[in-house]
Amino acid sequence: MSDLSIIEAVVLGALQGATEFLPVSSSGHLVIAQDLLGVQLEGASLLAFDVCLHFGTLAAVIAVFWRDIIQIVFGFFGKRYGSFASADVQSPSESRKLGWMLILGTIPAVIAVLLFGDFFESLVSDPLAAAFMLLVTGTILWLTRFSKVSRTNSGLGWLKTIVIGCAQAAAIVPGISRSGSTISAGLFFGIDRSLAAKFSFLLAVPAILGATVLQLGELSALSSDILLSVALGTLVAAIVGFICIKWLLALIKRGRFSIFAYYCWAAGLATIVYKLFIHNS
């Protein structure tokens, strides 16, 4: 029998909203948290709840970057969306180029899901694997402290976009942070910090939207008994996600992105110790 309390849903919603955009891996945290909380959702119901939480974070990123998204759409038609245009996107051609970059950056994740989808699904219920991957994420984040903005080539390019897209594909593995890997890839390339973060968040839109649309059929697995809990969890995910995007953007501008490495290491090690030495004792 599937069961989800309001408290569990709110906790998981807040966790999803924070970790989807902060570079600490939302999938890894959800796998670990669901295990620790003893969430009684089964199979399709658990997947359906995850779909709802991701919809909440999708709403958050759209709420922050709606001007950019509208301008990109209009850019494909060679038009500028009047006074609503983002200050960072000056012309339809630039908007159109950014749109193509987002499409290109999404392709590696699509290929990865098609080729290795079953493997990724097998990791969703393995908190120990997620914990080890958090250690990897922490190391990647820590290494960004040595990255420097290029004085001659701090913008996006096709090759940079493909590599960032591959970083997003790798983040399908629970414990590898999507925002952490994509922003880090941009920073290693010498891309401007603000642009690297913005592109990472915009790249999340087609990724989350595609995953949500493909799994919409799973929503039928939700029983009426947990609909209120699911709705509250989704709302909390959206609110917390919005706040965390704004905070992370400000943090990256100050060059303090690598500080999340210590949290990832601590969370990963704590989970490993708990699962190997405490939980099984």
Image: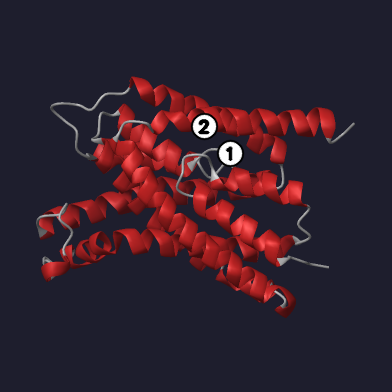
Residue 29 at x, y percent in the picture: 61, 45
Q: Residue at x 71, y 80 (%)?
A: 224
Quadrant showing the N terminus: bottom right
Residue 78 at x, y percent in the picture: 11, 65
Mark 2: give few (<14), some (14-19) or many (20+) Cα within 10 Å. Answer: many
Name the mark on residue 175. Answer: 1
Label 2 secondary element: helix
- Most extreme residue toward the right is 281
Mark 2 belongs to which amino acid? Thr
Name the mark on residue 137. Answer: 2
Whether residue 106 is visible here, answered yes or no, is no
Q: Residue at x 39, y 39 (%)?
A: 182
Residue 91 at x, y percent in the picture: 9, 57
Q: Are marks 2 and 1 in contact (CB under 8 Å)?
A: yes
Mark 1: give few (<14), some (14-19) or many (20+) Cα within 10 Å. Answer: many
User: Which residue occupies the foreground of this view, 107 or 61?
Assistant: 61
Quadrant showing the C terminus: top right
